[in-house]
Image (spheres, rainbow, N blue to C red):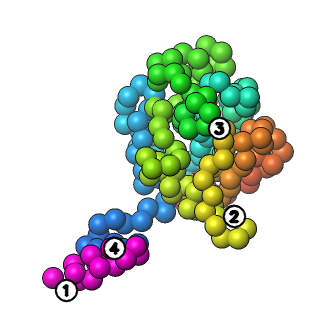
Amino acid sequence: MRVLYLCAVAALAGFPVACNGEDKKVTNPLEHKLTDIDDKEYDLSKLKGKVILIVNVASECGFTPQYKGLQELFDKYEKDGLVVIGIPSNEFNMQEPGTNAEIKKFCTTKFKVTFPMMAKVVIKGKNQIPLYKTLIEATPNKDGEVEQVSWNFEKFLISREGKVVGRFKPDIEPMSDEVVKAVKTELEKPKP
C-alpha cells in the first residue's frame, strides 16, 4: 500500500514513475506495434536483426519526391537486411489529407512503393503514437533536449538490435551520401 501511495504522490508531482510494471518506459522501437496501411497489425519485433529506416511521409509536400529515393534505397539494400517503413501523418500543413486507401494508391501508382507503409497516424502533439515518443526521446539534440519531428520526411535509422542510431532532417535525401553511409555502416554489423 505504501508503494502505491508513493507512486501516486510522485505521479501527481510530475515525476515519471513505473509502479508494479505499469507505465514502463519503452526505449526500443522494436517493442511497438503499428497498424499497416491495409489495417493489419504490424509488430516491429519481427524486424529484429534488420536495419530499419522509419520516415514520416506525406503526399502533398515539397519533399514528396523523396518517395523515389526511399524506394531506390530499399531496392538497393533490402537483400542486405534494410527495411524502409513509411508512416503517413497530417500534422505538417495538412499535407497528407487522404485516407489510407488513397495514400496506398498514390504511393504505389506514382512512386511504385513496395516497402511497408503504415496507416496514417499522429506523430506530434497530444495524440502522438508511442513509437514516435520513443524515437524522439532516443535522439536528443546536442544540448540534450528532446526535439519533436520538424516536418514531413524526417528519417530515423534503427540498428539490428533496435537502437536508434541516426536521425536525418527532412531535407536530407534518402540516397544522400550521409544516409547511405549510415545505412551501410549498420548493415555491415553482425546480426544479433
Callout 3 touching callout 4 (CB < 8 Å): no
Q: Earlier in the sequence, mark 2 or mark 1?
A: 1
**Looking at the image, residue 104 lies above or below residue 45:** above
- Crowding at label 1, few (<14), some or many (≥20) Cα neighbours within 10 Å? few
Query: At which x and y percent is residue 30?
Result: 47, 53
Question: Residue tagged by mark 1?
Answer: 2
In three-dimensional space, the C-alpha distance between marks 2 and 1, rounded to whole angstroms, equals 38 Å
Mark 3 element type: loop
Q: Secondary structure at mark 2?
A: loop
Q: Please indicate whether residue 180 sits to the left or right of residue 83 in the image.
A: right
Q: Which residue is disc 4 drawn over? A: 11
What residue span does the magenta drawing correspond to?
Answer: 1-15
Asked if residue 101 can be seen in this view, the reply is: yes
The span from disc 2 to disc 3 (Cα, nearest Å) is 19 Å
161 vs 6: above or below:
above
Residue at the left extreme, as displayed: 1
In the rendered image, residue 2 lying in the magenta stretch gets the answer yes
Q: Is residue 36 magenta?
A: no
Question: What is the C-alpha distance between the residues marked 3 and 4?
Answer: 34 Å
Near-viewer residue (149 or 42):
149
Which badge, 2 or 3, comes first in the chain's sequence?
A: 2
Q: In the image, is 129 to the left or to the right of 180?
A: left
**Number of the label disc, if any, that sits on residue 141:** 2
